[in-house]
Image (cartoon, coloured by chain):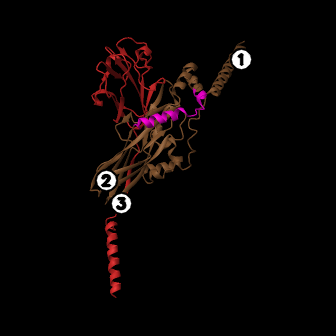
Chain colours: A red, B brown
Amino acid sequence: MNRKLLVGIMCTLLLSMVCVYAYDADTPYSVTLTIVVPSDTSFTVSLAGAESQIDFDDEVTGQNNEWVEPDSQDNTTSTAIIELTNTGNVALNYTLNVTSLPAWAILKADTDATMATAKIVNDTGNPEDCRVASNQAAAATTDVYLWLNTTGADAGTESETFQVNSEEY
Amino acid sequence: MKFRKGVIVALTLVGILLIATGLYITNMKRTVAINTFRFIPEKPDDFEAVKREAYAGTISMCNVDEEYYKQPEFYPSWKNAKRMYEEYSWSHWGRHGYTAFPLSMTYDVENMKKGDEINLCSFFANGWAVWTWQGFKLKPVENEFFSIDITPDLFVLDPTYPIVGDDYIKKITLKITAKQDIPLGTYEVGFTDESPSDYFNKKQTELTLAQQVKDKPLWIEKCTEITSDKEKCTELVNRREKSYSVGGKWKTENLPLTVVINAK
């Protein structure tokens, strides 16, 4: 009798211990997938010609004035160095920034081939400083032209990281 | 006399029509066809039904097989991206960008305890009409309540132009684990894309150069058909082939995947 009682108590204790780690009928763990948002902000960045990066080299482009275009850009034929294509299904804004620039350098950008009205791309870390396109519709392509002022440039090679950021309009 | 003139005019018109038709047919025959989608599996008969249920969230993206998710039509972006293939411009070449789907998922959880998990999947693809093999590192966006395991989290995606490669897209699996009992509230986690290490990129550049490219003459021919400049096209294709690019540098403000967890 005592042995049966002991076994009964042990079983009750064991069940109690299991219950501590399990969910009961009143408080089950449940998870429900409610929404899948069928939108995306896909985009493709294309460079002119066969450029794999943006190179400002006035010997290659044949320009000797203070403002130089990157290789393969030609504003006289409306060939921009960058094409941004919104392949997603929501409108996008685009901002540009560069991680750092030499003291002598001024970088400008615009979506048309007119350098005079282009915006300065700076290295302040605030991409809002150079918003090149707003509300670019899905499926649309935006050209981005760049110019660099090389007045007073030191001889040699400088390499910086240029960034294009997009956000949902 | 008038009748004779009429016959001559009619015969001349018929002749012009025949010549024009002949020229049209000849040109049609010369159109270079690149089988851009030859590595995409055959589309299953029930593709639209599976897509509908996946979009509705009634089946998990984890249960969508590759013959479904490798179809470009599975993605909302394809409707707009298709134009890039139909009217391809040889002036520029796609080097960067990605397609991620879905952009966001929302889960309602009740009584989520430490150690409980949510398992889900999303898709991450090379951008449309991108020529390069692109390397990506996916990094979890976690918080004090949830940890995330991403599989795979380091990979290279095949180009999507001129040929959409077999490995142009990855199914990404996320295991989201509660680090503690989850209080009521709304939490956002997900992943972002970063550049792989310099070592990884260097290795992949070497592997990309070792790729076999069989269709190069066809690409040059296609480009020449559009631009009428074979010399330029040869130069473009020679400079564009076998290129690896480092992903994670050109970003959207949105994460490639945001998971919203509503703890009730």
Q: Amino acid at mark 3?
A: Ser
Q: Main secondary structure of the magenta part?
A: helix
Q: Which residue is mark 3?
A: A30
State the residue in front, B8 or B245.
Answer: B245
Provide residue B201's location: percent of width, then percent of height: 45, 35
Provide residue B78's location: percent of width, then percent of height: 47, 38
State the residue in front, B16 or B202.
Answer: B202
Viewport quadrant of the C terminus of chain A: top left
Provide residue A168's location: percent of width, then percent of height: 34, 37
The secondary structure type at the circle numbered 3 is strand
- Are labels 2 and 1 on one chain? yes
Label 3–label 2 contact, CB within 8 A: no
The secondary structure type at the circle numbered 1 is helix
Can residue B156 be seen in the rendering of this structure?
yes
Q: Amino acid at mark 2?
A: Asn
Work out whether A27 lies above or below B50. below
The quarter of the picture where residue A110 lies is top left
Work out whether B126 lies above or below B64. above
Tell me the magenta residue range.
B195-219
Q: Which residue is mark 1?
A: B7
Q: Which residue is mark 2?
A: B262
Of tags 2 and 1, the one toward the viewer is: 2
The structure residue drawn at horizontal position 51% and vertical position 27%, both measured from the top left corner, is B240
